[in-house]
Amino acid sequence: MRKIPPKPRPSPGTITVRAAPGNRCRALVSFAGRTEQAAIGRGGMTARKREGDGATPIAAMPLIDGYVRADRTVPPATRLFLKRTRGDMLWCDAPDHACYNRPVSAPFAGRHETMMRSDGLYDVCLVMDWNMRVRRRNGGSAIFFHLIRPGYQPTEGCIAVSLPAMRRILAFARKGTLVKVLG
């Protein structure tokens, strides 16, 4: 009897982020034959990411999951797991706290970001594995792929795109899709 080998798993794909010419806070995001405009950290890109430096880390970061504000936007079609954002969802960015660079719930006394923001930046927010599996104190936290401010204003270190671009990215993405930020 001949054994049939299992079908190979399809690659989760790659999203490439390169600096845009002429502006260190802008980038070009490429995936599936497309290129989209993006904003990156006010500190540009760095290979030595530190908490609070405002820079986007030069790294290969797999997508883990994400958040969606279902009360403000229709959840996009994706193979990536998206949690519905609630008002008590926070993200710890206090380097000395045991929950550093982890989701936490309100009330929370340590320094944190609110996931249900009034400015809409996290209406769709993807979590990348930056400083998460193996955390380094002050290594940077809350490095997300999220929605853009008007005028493509710089981020605090995240990658930000328009809602239409995010919908196209989500149609492509799944857990493990690699986001490669190239310096």
Image: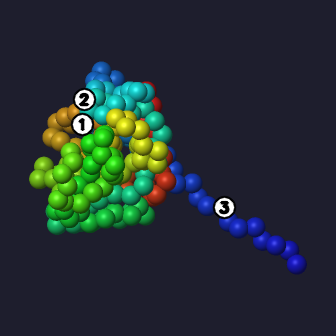
Q: Which residue is mark 2?
A: 42
In the displayed structure, 39 sits above or below 144; it is: above
Q: Which residue is mark 3?
A: 8
**Mark nearer the N terminus (1 vs 2):** 2
* Labels 3 & 2 near each other (Cβ < 8 A): no
Cα distance in 3D space between marks 1 and 3: 38 Å
Residue farthest right in this picture: 1
Q: Which residue is mark 1?
A: 155
- Amino acid under disc 3: Pro
Q: Residue at x 31, y 27 (%)?
A: 44
- Amino acid under disc 2: Arg
Quadrant position of the N terminus in the picture: bottom right
Q: Residue at x 42, y 43 (%)?
A: 135
Q: Quadrant of residue 73?
A: bottom left
Cα distance in 3D space between marks 1 and 2: 6 Å
Q: Which mark is residue 32?
A: none
Q: Residues within 10 Å of mark 1 (few under 14, many from 20)?
A: many
Q: Quadrant of residue 21?
A: top left
